Image: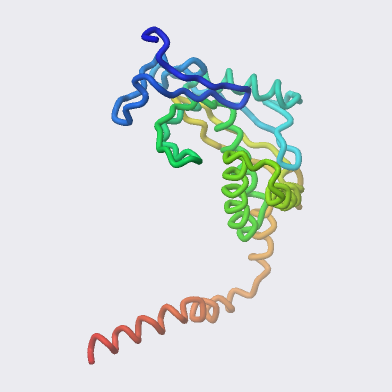
Amino acid sequence: VKDKPYSIDQNLWGRSVECGPIDDPAFEPPEDAFEWTVQPEKAPNKPQYVTIGFNEGVPVALSGREMEAVKLIEELNRLAGNHGVGRIDHMEDRTVGLKTREVYECPAALTLIEAHRDLEKLTLTRSELAFKHLVDLEWAWLVYSGLWVDPLRRELEAFIEASQKRVTGEVKVKLFKGNAAVVGRKALTPAHDLSSTTRQLAEALDQTLAKGFIEHWGLQAVAHRLEKAEEETS
């Protein structure tokens, strides 16, 4: 109908809108498509800071107040949405092959994902982070595709649960004009803070070893470049 041209799905985690004028990928979504978020240009001119507490990867506190997950998400939806955070304009590839344009509102989800990812960067190793990125993508695809009961989903979650044992701490986020920017992070204990631990280890290293490491680090790249140079001059 003309007064309600949209198809809308929503739950605690987010709100998706499609159809009507949104069907045209070149058309900017009208403001009446949004309900959870303030237009970023009209959001408050003063930023708001929130601190999100995580325990083994799970958000458990907001600005010093312990909360049940549902209450925390509801409150963060309100706070972040008031600052225009959480709008996504997205071209989506459906499982059946259709390519469609959808608009999402997910203030709490985007803020939590950003904060959680940042705390992972502080507490996980480089190799764990690289592999978890792949795991996250595969897990999301399985769930999106309706394959919740696929055994791979449970197997991926076994790695996720193991990796989150050290992801405990607090992340400070600045909400302002459509952005949720991490401006500080702190692990629960020094043992969880890999940035502090690696700095201490680096200070104890024999700095004279750096020369040999540098010479060997790019050995294959140097060999390839020399080979190319010989080909070019022959």
Residue at 39% from the left image edge and 16% from the top image edge: 31
> Is 28 situated above or below 186?
above
> Is 234 situated above or below 182?
below
Residue 9 in the image: x percent, y percent? 54, 22
Q: How is the image coloured?
A: rainbow
Residue at 60% from the left image edge and 37% from the top image edge: 115
Residue 88 in the image: x percent, y percent? 45, 30
**Residue 226, located in which quarter of the rendered image?**
bottom left
**Residue 52, located in which quarter of the rendered image?**
top right
From the viewer's side, name the closer residue of 73 and 147.
147
Q: Is residue 200 left or right of residue 38?
A: right
Residue 106 in the image: x percent, y percent? 54, 27
> Is 222 situated above or below 126?
below
> Is 177 situated above or below 217?
above
Residue at 67% from the left image edge and 53% from the top image edge: 124
State whether residue 43 appears in this view: no
State whether residue 204 appears in this view: yes
From the viewer's side, name the closer residue of 87 and 190.
87
Q: Is residue 234 left or right of residue 123?
A: left
Residue projecting furthest to the left = 233
Q: Quadrant of the N terminus?
A: top left
Residue projecting furthest to the front = 96
Q: Is residue 93 left or right of residue 195?
A: left
Residue projecting furthest to the top = 3
Residue projecting furthest to the bottom = 234
